[in-house]
Image (spheres, rainbow, N blue to C red):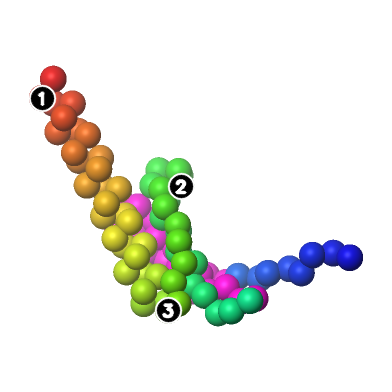
Amino acid sequence: MPKRIRWTYTTARAAAHGCDLTVSATTGAGDTWAWFVVAGGQHVANGGALSMESAQEQAEAAARRHAEGIEEQSRQMTLF
């Protein structure tokens, strides 16, 4: 028997802190909101939340952390 197909649809897309942010609604076992952060075509972070607003906030926070990590690495490189 084939597996049940889970459909997703993109509901929000944005750019912040040099990253592309996507928040998608998923249905299945329960309504959840998945979020993904991509920088330069590379996966940075992802997660899930119970509301669209929370997913957007978490995606933005992950993008900010990623950007801050790059800035910190750049500062350390200039010290050497």
Tell me the residue that label 2 is attached to: 43
- Of the image marks 3 and 2, the number of the one nearer the N terminus: 2
Q: Main secondary structure of the magenta part?
A: strand
Disc 3 is placed on an element classified as loop
| Viewer can see residue 12 | no
Q: Residue furthest left?
A: 79
Tell me the residue that label 3 is attached to: 51
Dot 1 alpha-carbon crowd within 10 angstroms: few under 14, some 14 to 19, many 20 or more: few
Q: Give the residue type that dot 2 points to.
A: His
Disc 1 is placed on an element classified as helix
Location of residue 11 in the rendering, given as x and y in whole percent from the top left corner: 48, 74
Which quadrant of the figure contains the C terminus? Answer: top left
Picture disc at residue 67 = none
Q: CA distance from mark 1 to mark 3?
A: 42 Å
Q: Tell me where residue 77 sits by quadrant.
A: top left
Location of residue 41 in the rendering, given as x and y in whole percent from the top left corner: 45, 44
Q: Nearer the viewer, mark 3 or mark 2?
A: 3
Is residue 33 on the magenta stretch? no
Question: In the rendered structure, which segment of residues is drawn in magenta?
Answer: 9-28
Q: Residue furthest top?
A: 80
Q: CA distance from mark 2 to mark 1?
A: 28 Å
- Of the image marks 2 and 1, the number of the one nearer the N terminus: 2
Q: Give the residue type that dot 3 points to.
A: Ser
Q: Which sits in the foreground, 15 or 33?
A: 33
Q: Give the residue type that dot 1 points to.
A: Leu
